[in-house]
Image (cartoon, grey):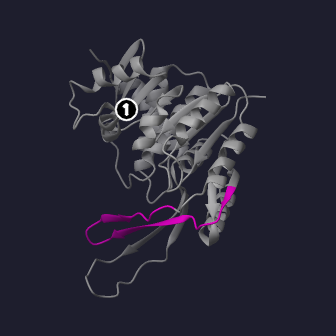
């Protein structure tokens, strides 16, 4: 039996999408029929993995009417799931596209309060599901009520179970989490600056700051997401800049989560660290080509990755 991939989402969401002809203040604006997608960091990772033909199990918090809707959406996509019941409602986000200007407006509502019994059930579920060699991917921010050191507790639990911990989060939760053993940390530039306690990061400081984190904390690999510019891979023995291809962009929603999905699927097939990062960048780029929250398409990923293998320069960082 092969190693499992388990994704963890503590602040999941039902994403509602619609279009309007234009924005006009103080008037009722006609909207297109809404589209609904399951969302939130780890859930998006599971959905992107499914698009790539890779199975995973999604552990997430789910409550109320919107939580029921979230469960139904995942059933439609045939994502294996373990929802943990919440007393409060799962959140809902709204994305509206102005078809006149082609500008997109994203409205994010706060997550529900999670009580102590509920978040401790998450740890129990992880302990019950995780076996030696399994991957646990924690992605997304913490909702109210969950302690800031929660991802640190998750990382410790994964280490005790001899699993592999992959993390993509932000804020104080990130500061605590990096003290636990992490196989891959995927910050963006803002999150890296926050971790390193600097106001901004330049092209000349990104690599030394990232390498300092590798030397200071039990992190094996850091892949810094640079958006449309690609990614920086740093390990104890390697620093490489992976350039992203230029693609037609329809939406950036879920691109980072798709990048994580691509890297995990690469680890399952024993690719090198450079190939892993290239494939992750290809998945992120492929996601930006798709409208709404559809995430990456396998055919697009394959095309982009093959192009990157032939044409994209991986640059040594000094």
Residue furthest front as drawn: 116
Quadrant where the C terminus sits is top left
Identify the magenta region: 84-111
Which residue is rendered at x = 53% and y = 28% of the image?
Answer: 180
- Location of residue 206 with respect to 261 vertically, above or below: above
Q: Residue 87: where, in percent of width, then height? A: 64, 65
* 130 w.r.t. 218: above or below: below
Residue at the extreme bottom of the image, as rendered:
27
How many residues crowd around disc 1 within 10 Å: few (fewer than 14), some, or many (20 or more)?
many
Q: Mark 1 highlights which residue?
A: 224
Write the residue at 71% across / 44% down: 125
Q: Position of residue 288 (x, y in %)?
A: 40, 49
- Judge from the rendering whether residue 153 lies leftward or rightward of residue 190; answer left or right: right
Q: How many marks?
A: 1
Can residue 245 be seen here? The reply is: no
Q: Is residue 12 at least partly visible in the picture?
A: yes
Taking the image as shown, residue 292 lies to the left or right of residue 114, namely: left
Residue positioned 35% across, 68% down in the render:
97
Q: Where is the N terminus found, in terms of image quarters?
A: top right
Q: Residue furthest right?
A: 1
Q: Is residue 220 magenta?
A: no
Q: Residue 206 in the image: x percent, y percent? A: 27, 27
- Picture residue at 41% right of the left edge, 29% below the top: 223
Asked whether, in this view, residue 69 is left or right of residue 242, the answer is: right
In the rendered image, residue 97 lying in the magenta stretch gets the answer: yes
Task: Tell me where residue 31 appears, x and y as whole percent.
Answer: 41, 79
- Which element is circle 1 on? strand
Q: Nearer the viewer, residue 49 or 99?
A: 49
The front one of 7 and 120 is 120
């Amino acid at each position: 039996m092969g190693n499992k991939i388990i994704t963890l989402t503590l602040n999941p969401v039902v994403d509602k999408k619609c279009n309007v002809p234009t924005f006009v203040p103080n008037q009722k604006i006609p909207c297109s029929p809404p589209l609904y997608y399951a969302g939130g960091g780890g859930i998006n990772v599971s959905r992107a993995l499914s698009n790539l033909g890779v199975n995973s199990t999604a552990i997430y918090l789910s409550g109320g009417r919107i939580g029921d809707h979230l469960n139904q959406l995942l059933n439609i996509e045939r994502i294996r799931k373990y929802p943990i019941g919440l007393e409060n409602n799962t959140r809902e986000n709204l994305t509206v596209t102005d078809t006149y200007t082609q500008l997109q407006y994203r409205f994010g509502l706060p997550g529900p309060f999670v009580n102590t019994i509920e978040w401790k059930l998450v740890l129990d579920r992880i302990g019950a599901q995780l076996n030696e060699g399994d991957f646990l991917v924690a992605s997304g921010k913490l909702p109210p009520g969950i302690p800031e050191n929660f991802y640190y507790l998750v990382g410790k639990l994964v280490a005790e179970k001899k699993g592999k911990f992959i993390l993509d989060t932000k804020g104080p939760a990130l500061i605590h989490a990096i003290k636990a053993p992490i196989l891959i940390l995927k910050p963006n530039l803002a999150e890296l600056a926050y971790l390193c306690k600097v106001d901004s990061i330049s092209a000349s400081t990104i690599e030394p700051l990232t390498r300092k984190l590798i030397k200071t904390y039990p992190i094996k690999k850091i892949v810094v997401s640079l958006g449309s510019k690609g990614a920086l891979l740093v390990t104890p023995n390697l620093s490489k800049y992976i350039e992203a291809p230029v693609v037609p962009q329809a939406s950036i929603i879920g691109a980072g989560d798709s990048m994580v999905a691509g890297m995990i699927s690469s680890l399952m097939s024993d690719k090198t660290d450079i190939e892993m990062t290239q494939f992750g960048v290809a998945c992120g780029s492929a996601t930006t080509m798709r409208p709404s929250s559809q995430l990456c398409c396998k055919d697009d990923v394959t095309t982009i990755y093959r192009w990157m293998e032939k044409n994209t320069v991986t640059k040594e960082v000094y």
